[in-house]
């Protein structure tokens, strides 16, 4: 399995904003930068909690709208299929996800064998495949550790 490299996509912000005639405000830049630094597929609330330290007046609504705008212009992806709250992914390159059923973690997974997964002809005949994303569900290493002091709450944790 290829190891996930730390996200380094900040160059895509000016490029995408220019293309979609979107102004780059310091808040928008901060939201995107923070998302790129996180590999946890955070929720809008988690992004908001982090950004608030630098922009105390920024509202959750603004962060929400910013993330949805980013998703609309293809700068980030909404991670599908995990119910609410929505989770965001700064990595729009093809990759796969490991989803922990205990703590809700979504871990990036880079694997050429999964990329090259053969689709049975029966399926590709009835459905034109454009992209493939494999989601493996299970229990992450942290949650399998027996001495884990307390259940992590990636999703429920809220900023104050
Ligand atoms: Zn876990
Ligand atoms: Zn991802």
Image: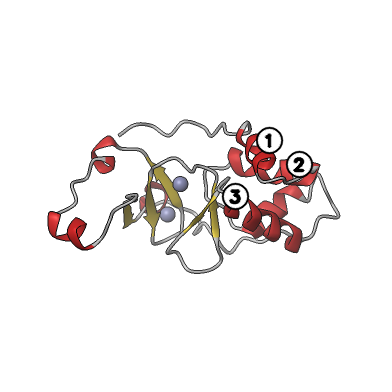
User: Residue 73 shows which numbered tag?
Assistant: 3
**Residue 154 in view (yes/no):** no
Rendering coords of residue 18 (x, y %): 69, 39
User: Residue 24 shows which numbered tag?
Assistant: 2
Rendering coords of residue 59 (x, y %): 79, 60
| Residue at 58%, 64% in the rendered image | 156
Rendering coords of residue 153 (x, y %): 54, 59
**Residue 16 in view (yes/no):** yes
Question: CA separation, marks 3 and 1?
Answer: 12 Å
Viewer-proximal residue among 140 and 41: 41
Q: Secondary structure at mark 1?
A: helix
Q: Earlier in the sequence, mark 2 or mark 1?
A: 1
Colour scheme of the picture: secondary structure
Question: CA separation, marks 2 and 3?
Answer: 13 Å
Q: Earlier in the sequence, mark 2 or mark 3?
A: 2
Of all residues, the one furthest to the right in this rendering is 57
* Residue wearing tag 1: 14
Q: Is residue 8 left or right of residue 55?
A: left
Tell me the quadrant of ligand 1: bottom left
Q: Quadrant of residue 19?
A: top right
User: In what quadrant of the picture does the N terminus appear?
Assistant: top left
Viewer-proximal residue among 24 and 154: 24
Of all residues, the one furthest to the bottom in this rendering is 84
Question: CA separation, marks 2 and 1?
Answer: 7 Å
Q: Is mark 1 within 8 Å of ligand 2?
A: no
Can you say whether 81 is above or below 129 in the image? Answer: below
Q: Secondary structure at mark 2?
A: loop
User: In what quadrant of the picture does the C terminus appear?
Assistant: bottom right
Q: Are marks 2 and 1 in contact (CB under 8 Å)?
A: yes
């Amino acid at each position: 399995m290829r190891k996930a490299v730390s996200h380094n996509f900040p160059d895509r912000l000016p490029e995408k904003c220019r293309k979609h005639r979107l102004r780059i405000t310091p808040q928008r830049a901060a939201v995107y930068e923070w998302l790129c630094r996180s590999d946890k597929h955070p929720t809008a609330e988690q992004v908001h909690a982090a950004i608030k330290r630098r922009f105390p007046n920024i509202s959750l609504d603004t962060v929400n709208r910013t993330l949805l705008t980013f998703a609309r212009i293809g700068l980030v992806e909404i991670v599908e299929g995990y119910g609410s709250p929505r989770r965001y992914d700064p990595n729009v390159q093809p990759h796969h996800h490991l989803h922990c059923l205990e703590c809700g973690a979504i871990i990036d997974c880079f694997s050429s064998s999964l990329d090259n997964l053969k689709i049975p002809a029966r399926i590709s005949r009835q459905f034109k495949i454009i992209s493939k994303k494999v989601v493996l569900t299970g229990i992450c290493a942290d949650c399998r550790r027996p001495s884990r002091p307390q259940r992590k709450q990636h999703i429920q944790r809220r900023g104050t």
